[in-house]
Amino acid sequence: MQNGTFLTTLPVILIVDLRRGWLRSAIVGLAHPLRFALFGAGFWARYQLSAWQELGGVECVAIYNRTLSRAEALAREFGADRAYGDAEALLAAEDLDFVDIATDVSTHAPFVKMAAERGIPVICQKPMGITLAECEEMVSACREAGVPLLIHENWRWQAPIRAVKDLLRKRPIGEIARARISMVTGFDVFENQPFLRETEQFILADLGSHLLDTARFLFGEPCSLYCRTQRIRRDIRGEDVATVLLSFREGPVVICEMSYAGSRREGDCFPQTMISVEGSEGTLDLGPGYEIRVVNGKGARCVRAEPPLYSWADPQYQVVHSSIVPIVANLRDALLGKTCAETTGDDNLRTMRLVFAAYESAARNQVLPV
């Protein structure tokens, strides 16, 4: 890849997108898949690669991991040509159309900047960075380099959450007054992601980034927030319970509640997100089993918004893993200039501002403008 051109072997029409400051390419007669490298070979990497293969139109040609043997094993499993234990060496050797960064959050900023310096578009997992300043630097680095920064924020792409959004657009419950977005579970997330035990900023950064982004997706941009956090488990470093209250100037009050504190309840629905919306003319509830129930003056209506089933998805994570396919489709098509990405670095920066404002609010025990 040279001079910021996505593909060099095919005719390309370059379109300047003044709103974002980067060149989009409209591929003429696309004959070859986009070549990418995956950074990271941890828990989520396998599902990320499976989703890319499910989608098609892309080819993983290289995998980096700091433990080379893990990169080699994943490369063999998914047919990637090469494995690296050195990220700089990979970027210097490979001809790439983009990189997909699925490493620990502490490495996101240096890897994003490393790719941007070489003019390579970046897809980066959430949370974007470990501080707000770091997130802003990542966005600026890609903007200055003239390359896209796209964030893999897949929660809003879950089938039931998309269905809730579609229903709310039709205004079946009138003016929205209040809403609750909840993920409270006793699932032991530390079993398959043990590094989370040592994370000083845990549930707001890890799960809160999802729920706060979902709140933005469903209801728009809040004007203030208030947050309280707790640490119930004593064998972890960060907070495992958080409650965030979002206020909107001309809209609802939205409560985002999250817990990994071993909250035991019958029929734990991990990792389903529950959503309850109250309006001037009725209610909408997303409940267990992906059931959406709308009650208004016309009566009650119930629909199911089950996620697609993929053989490669972990049954425990089905609704989450299935959401990877539509988001990578959106990000791929954005790189090809066919559409606009929903979760750009600029967009996700708004979510990260809410995450870090929530930490500040909890520390100060104050309502903060956002």
Image (cartoon, rainbow, N blue to C red):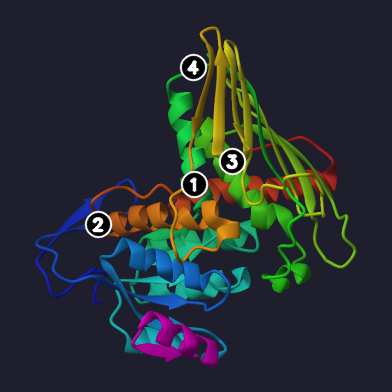
Q: Secondary structure at mark 2?
A: strand
Residue with the mark numbered 1: 158
Mark 3–mark 2 distance (CA, rounded to whole Å): 40 Å
Quadrant into which the N terminus falls: bottom left
Mark 3 or mark 4, which has the lower sequence index?
4
Mark 4 and mark 1 lie on one chain; the one further toward the N terminus is 1
Mark in front: 3 vs 4: 3
Going by the numbered disc 3, the residue's amino acid type is: Gly
Distance between the alpha carbons at the discs numbered 1 and 2: 27 Å
Decide which of tag 1 and tag 2 comes sooner along the chain: 2
Q: Which residue is mark 4?
A: 172
As for residue 296 lying within the magenta part, the answer is no
Name the element at disc 1. Answer: loop
Tell me the residue that label 3 is attached to.
289
Magenta span: 69-85
Q: Amino acid at mark 2?
A: Arg
Whole-number angstrom distance, CA of label 4 to CA of label 1: 21 Å
| Residue 317 left/right relative to 309 | right
Rate crowding at label 2 as few (under 14), some (14 to 19) or many (20 or more) other CA atoms within 10 Å.
many
For mark 3, give the secondary structure. helix
Q: Is 74 a magenta residue?
A: yes
Q: How many C-alpha atoms fall within 10 Å of the one at disc 1: few (<14), some, or many (≥20)?
A: many
Amino acid type, mark 1: Gln
Task: From this view, report whether residue 90 is shown above or below residue 6.
Answer: below
Closer to the chain start, of discs 1 and 3, is 1
Numbered tag placed on residue 24 in the rendering: 2
Can residue 147 be seen from the camera position used here?
no
